[in-house]
Image (spheres, coloured by chain):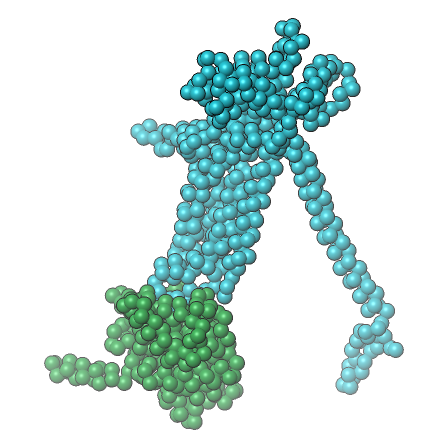
Chain colours: A cyan, B green
């Protein structure tokens, strides 16, 4: 076995050939295999690390969020026989006194003013409103005595969820007193406490009281905002992409436009908020006329326009990529049978590019849904209790709602924050999933 | 003076009878680079004219001038004169869409639309408004598929996608698509280069049949194919036409030494 042997070429020259089994060769092979293995493990560990962080994130969010999806209610006997209450005014009657009397009646021994006040704090301050919803849903209760489920205060609710920390600490270090614990235990023994699905969280707007706070206002606000964003950025983005890709002459000017679109996609989103504030809300004063301005503050309309500005570059880039990926042979085929440029684009290129365009739009929309910063600039961070009914009503959106709740110190809001985050994540996953489905369903068919 | 004009007209109309497309001093530039250099070629009606020559000699570029497909390339500039039935196709009054309906094209790689077989053929007649009503359109589709020799193979699956056919069938579908708008001239850019020998034979036979109704210009890399299907041949070399003439003559008795070396395989 000659390993590396000079070989005579017959014409006086010699060449040195590497033999397959030479130790040098084997060492080199082993080294190459080791390098490949190292690289593989490196990649694998990176993926595992990313997966671990994802699991950690979901674990904390889900763990924090789950308690917020249920709530504890107390069954209170309400005396609805008072003459002032009729079926006609049931929807705007003030039930505060009735609720106080009903709940106080469960503890006839409590007489002192101070004690009464702390007892009343066990039911939510929104209980009167909840009572109004219940009664106006069940008008035949008027004039009778009814047992009505009313929300507990957040402290009481958290007590039953065992989220108030170590209760063996001295009373002064707890948010709940021994007496309150005793009352709650008594209520529980009477079977008056019920844990149910937290409908308030899914149907209410913002509130200072964590047990009365819900995400519905933010969800509606997000929905209205995204509608505006989509309605503005989709047609403009796709039209721009078609023009740049199919019709625009390739020259310095279009090169400049292309570079700037790519730059715009990388501009920090808060800058778009400033732009929206300056142009849509304040308007640019040129002395003899004002450009823009007059758009409502804190409204879904303005928010949608700002997000449309932000999404537009992404939309154009994604649509251009999709249009570019349609093979030129399809265009030639259409032109070859005498289709005009417009016919070629609208009959052949655009339908084939549509899955890509839609995927890009959905991903752009998902980004817009998760955006907070530009909306802070145009006042969508305001505390809005009412559910927005139109595009010009004051509104807030999910990520801003999360941002605001995260600022509140009450423990109850920690769970709300996590729950809202979970719902936002759910929407994002849903949208990205839709994009994946669309992409695989309409995969290239040529 | 009058007699001179009459003579010219007489001469022109006399020539028109056996010249479908007349190309004079056609030059093509890609930006600064000249791809074709003052090419002159007459294309005879109802004959197959083969354009042969080594790669990059400008034969495809020339073919794409004949239905102004080069218009789609921004940097491409065409000078000279190309007449179709004595009408300048580069005249500003000519609509390129109408021109392409008269001068159809079949491409190197079969490129059916990702739609049904029926839609592939029906698309052209539909956008040109050639059919009044669905029945007439279906008639055109059937006639075109029959002429392209594809009818028997696909008549039961017209709703299936055209991209699902075999390569040779796809190319015949593209020919049917071109025929469907009733062109006068069909341009074919190496139509068999992506096909196997059996599919090639079928397409070549089809080209020979189509000659009865259409004027055909075919670019080909294969000497044998040019010899088999064409009546006229033009040999391109480095952007010039070196030699034109009847196929028999060019292949048996080439006048130019470059033609001879190419067809005998010494250059190419």
Q: Residue at x 39, y 64 (%)?
A: B72
Residue extending furthest toward the left: B2
**Is there any visible trace of residue B25 in the rendered image?**
no
Left or right of residue B66, residue A52 in this image = right
Quarter holding residue B205: bottom left
Residue extending furthest toward the top: A112
Q: Position of residue B64 (x, y in %)?
A: 39, 72
Quarter holding residue A339: bottom left
- The residue closer to the viewer here, A322 or A229, is A229
Q: Residue at x 50, y 70 (%)?
A: B164
Q: Position of residue A299 (x, y in %)?
A: 44, 31
Quarter holding residue A78: top right
Q: Position of residue B182 (x, y in %)?
A: 31, 75
- The residue closer to the viewer here, A121 or A369, is A121
**Is there any visible trace of residue A360 in the rendered image?**
yes
Left or right of residue B152, residue A2 in this image = right
Quadrant where the N terminus of chain B lies? bottom left
Q: Residue at x 43, y 39 (%)?
A: A228
* Vertical position of residue A162 compared to residue B241: above or below: above
């Amino acid at each position: 076995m000659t390993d590396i042997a000079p070989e005579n070429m017959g014409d006086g020259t010699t060449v040195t050939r590497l033999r397959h089994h030479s130790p040098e060769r084997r060492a080199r092979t082993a080294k190459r295999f080791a390098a490949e293995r190292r690289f593989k493990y490196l990649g694998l560990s990176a993926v595992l690390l990313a997966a671990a962080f994802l699991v950690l994130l979901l674990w904390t969010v889900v763990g924090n969020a789950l308690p917020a999806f249920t709530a504890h209610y107390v069954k209170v006997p309400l005396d609805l026989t008072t003459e002032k209450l009729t079926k006609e005014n049931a929807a705007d009657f003030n039930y505060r006194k009735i609720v106080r009397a009903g709940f106080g009646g469960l503890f006839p021994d409590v007489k002192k003013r101070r004690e009464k006040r702390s007892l009343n704090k066990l039911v939510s301050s929104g209980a009167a409103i909840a009572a109004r919803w219940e009664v106006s849903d069940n008008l035949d209760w008027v004039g009778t005595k009814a047992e009505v489920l009313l929300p507990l205060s957040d402290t009481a609710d958290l007590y039953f969820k065992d989220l108030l920390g170590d209760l063996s600490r001295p009373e002064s270090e707890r948010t709940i007193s021994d007496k309150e614990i005793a009352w709650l235990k008594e209520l529980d023994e009477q079977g008056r406490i019920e844990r149910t699905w937290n409908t308030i969280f899914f149907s209410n707007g913002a509130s200072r009281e964590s047990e009365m706070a819900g995400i519905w206002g933010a969800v509606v606000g997000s929905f209205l905002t995204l509608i505006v964003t989509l309605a503005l950025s989709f047609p403009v983005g796709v039209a721009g992409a078609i023009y740049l890709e199919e019709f625009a002459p390739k020259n310095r000017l279009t090169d400049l436009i292309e570079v700037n679109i790519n730059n715009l996609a990388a501009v920090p989103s808060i800058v778009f908020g400033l732009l929206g504030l300056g142009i849509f809300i304040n308007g640019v004063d040129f002395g003899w006329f004002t450009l823009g301005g007059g758009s409502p503050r804190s409204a879904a309309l303005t928010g949608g326009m700002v997000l449309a500005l932000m999404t537009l570059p992404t939309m154009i880039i994604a649509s251009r990529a999709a249009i570019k990926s349609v093979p030129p042979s399809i265009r030639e085929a259409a032109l070859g049978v005498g289709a005009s440029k417009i016919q070629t684009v609208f009959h052949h290129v655009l339908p084939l590019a549509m899955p890509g365009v839609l995927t890009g739009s959905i991903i752009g929309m998902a980004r817009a849904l998760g955006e907070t910063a530009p909306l802070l600039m145009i006042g969508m961070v305001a505390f809005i209790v009412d559910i927005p009914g139109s595009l010009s009503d004051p509104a807030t959106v999910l990520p801003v709602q999360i941002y605001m709740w995260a600022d509140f110190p009450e423990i109850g809001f920690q769970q709300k924050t996590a729950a809202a985050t979970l719902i936002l994540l759910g929407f994002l996953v849903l949208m990205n999933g839709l994009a994946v489905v669309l992409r695989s369903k309409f995969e290239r068919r040529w | 003076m009058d007699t001179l004009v009459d003579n010219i007209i007489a001469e022109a109309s006399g020539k028109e009878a056996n010249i479908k497309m007349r190309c004079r001093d056609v030059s093509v530039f890609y930006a600064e680079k000249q791809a074709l250099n003052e090419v002159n070629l007459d294309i005879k009606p109802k004959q197959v004219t083969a354009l042969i020559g080594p790669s990059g000699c400008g034969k495809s570029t020339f073919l794409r001038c004949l239905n102004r497909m080069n218009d789609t390339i921004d940097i491409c500039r065409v000078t000279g004169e190309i007449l179709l039935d004595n009408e300048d196709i580069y005249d500003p009054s000519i609509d390129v869409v109408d021109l392409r309906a008269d001068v159809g094209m079949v491409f190197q790689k079969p490129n059916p639309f990702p739609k049904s077989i029926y839609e592939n053929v029906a698309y052209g007649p539909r956008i040109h408004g050639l059919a009044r009503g669905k029945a007439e359109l279906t008639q055109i589709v059937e006639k075109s598929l029959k002429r392209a020799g594809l009818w028997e193979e696909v008549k039961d699956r017209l709703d299936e996608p055209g991209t699902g056919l075999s390569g040779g069938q796809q190319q015949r579908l593209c020919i049917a698509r071109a025929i469907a708008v009733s062109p006068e001239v069909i341009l074919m850019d190496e139509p068999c280069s992506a096909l196997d020998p059996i599919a090639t034979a079928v397409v070549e036979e089809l080209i020979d049949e189509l000659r009865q109704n259409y004027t055909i210009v075919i670019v080909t890399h294969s000497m044998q194919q040019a010899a088999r299907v064409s009546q006229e041949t033009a040999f391109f070399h480095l952007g010039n036409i070196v030699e034109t003439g009847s196929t028999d003559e060019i292949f048996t008795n080439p006048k130019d030494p470059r033609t001879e070396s190419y067809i005998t395989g010494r250059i190419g």
